[in-house]
Amino acid sequence: MPETTPEMDALNARLETARRRAVKTLKGFSADFPEGIDPWHMHGSRPDKADFPVPELVLFLLRNLMRWRWRGPGEKTRWTVLGSVEGEPVAFELRKFGFTILRGENPKISDARIVGQLKSALRDVEDLLGLVAEAQVAHGKALIINRAGEFEARYRFFRNLADKAYRKASRAPRKKKSDNAQASGFADMIGFLSHSMAANQQGFFHSTAMVDAYFSALEHRLVLLRAFTGRPMAEGEMLTLLGSKWDGKLKDVLPVEGDREAADLLGRMRRLKERVRNPFAHGGVENDGGSIFVHIPGLGALPANFSRFGDSVRFSLHPIEADDHAEACALFDALDLRLSSGALEGANTMLRAGVDPSFDAETLAKYATAGSEGPESVDAYIEHWSRAWERHANMDY
């Protein structure tokens, strides 16, 4: 027999405790499922998604703790677990179109009772599996859903709106017909100023939203790229990566030591974050004191950062002008180019293909191998992953 460890003994003890609690909470639930009944012919209903957002917990509860029979996968069905409640046959399935409860003809036990007991019992299941989850994450045996496309779309949405607003600000509005040329000229001038100010304000609103969206997209992208580089990770490094600041994530993926271009991009990104993102994300507070005004006798209220106030977003009439927006866009484009070329080309290709990265040693080694063998190897890995994902998502077993 394999030797046990204190950790295994503790987990087994908690497992047995969870089993006893489940039996008590699920009073009336039994592993007995009548012979001769085909679940295919039972009546199915889908409970509210909010009741069982993670249906697999029901499988663990009934299969692993209550020791019900189960089977799967099947056609458009990932698993089925079979038993009874107060002698009435019941089955639970995870189908392509949702978690389903299967009942026999004219059941006397209500679905509400079954759902209520299951939800109560799942609390102990989550406490138990929480320990397993912590250990898995510590060892990198976890994945992160790739939402790079969603983050990118949000960034592009606000960037396009800002581009349109600033272009609108530079164009004169349509002229109104008037018999008085002098009055018409004055009205045109006032109309243009009003039109330009309104459009510039819209550009400012959209541009600040763009900057915020880009930094969010960047952090998500850097976490995914770190996995796709295939470099091994030490125990606990996954959590360290997720908890690090954006510039730490960037330096991990794009080392700046000895790379002047990368160092320049990092510096410019830091300045943009300090000047634009932080003030608007943190209630207008500027780290260098630009949001604070001090009273100097004989002079009045002066910005606490004095001449450095010239770099504040509040120095101009419009905090973000068209030139500021264009400069930010150029910076983002330059950084995007570095994160998608050279040594990061293969990793970026996997990211753009929508692969959900895993952080365990075995999978990281596969990413490293695919990346080192060139574009064809990367494409082959993406094709293999995509087929497996589609088969699982569509339950084409």
Image: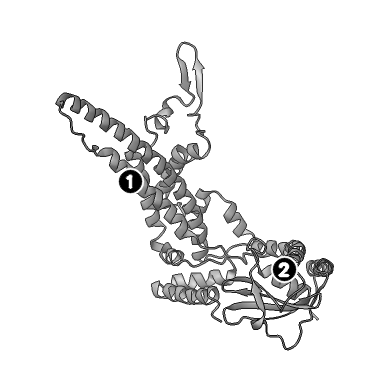
Q: Tell me the residue at 50%/31% (across/down).
A: 288
Q: Tell me the residue at 43%/28% (across/down).
A: 309
Q: Looking at the rendering, which quadrant does residue 99 occupy?
A: bottom right
Residue 94 point in image, percent of width and height: 63, 73
| Amino acid type at image mark 2 | Asp
Answer above or below: position of 339 versus 368.
Answer: above
Q: Residue furthest bottom?
A: 36
Give the side of residue 149 with respect to residue 56, left or right: left
Answer above or below: position of 344 versus 311.
Answer: below
Residue 28 point in image, percent of width and height: 82, 72
For label 2, the crowd category at 10 Å Cα-Cα, with few meaning under 14, some 14 to 19 and many 20 or more, is some
Q: Looking at the image, tell me whether mark 2 or mark 1 is earlier in sequence order.
A: 2
In depth, the one of 97 and 228 nearer the eye is 97
Q: Residue furthest front?
A: 106
Residue at which label 1 appears: 163
Q: Residue furthest top?
A: 298
Residue 123 point in image, percent of width and height: 75, 61
Mark drawn on residue 111: 2
Instruction: Name the secondary structure under disc 1.
Output: helix
Image quadrant containing the N terminus: bottom right
Image quadrant containing the C terminus: bottom right
Residue 371 point in image, percent of width and height: 45, 70
For label 1, the crowd category at 10 Å Cα-Cα, with few meaning under 14, some 14 to 19 and many 20 or more, is some
Measured in 3D between alpha carbons, the distance from the residue under mark 2 to the one under mark 1, in whole angstroms, is 54 Å
Q: Tell me the residue at 47%/39% (across/down).
A: 274
Mark drawn on residue 228: none
Answer above or below: position of 163 versus 228.
Answer: above
In depth, the one of 114 and 277 nearer the eye is 114
Q: Looking at the rendering, which quadrant does residue 188 occupy?
A: top left
In depth, the one of 298 and 313 nearer the eye is 313
Q: Tell me the residue at 40%/60% (across/down).
A: 340
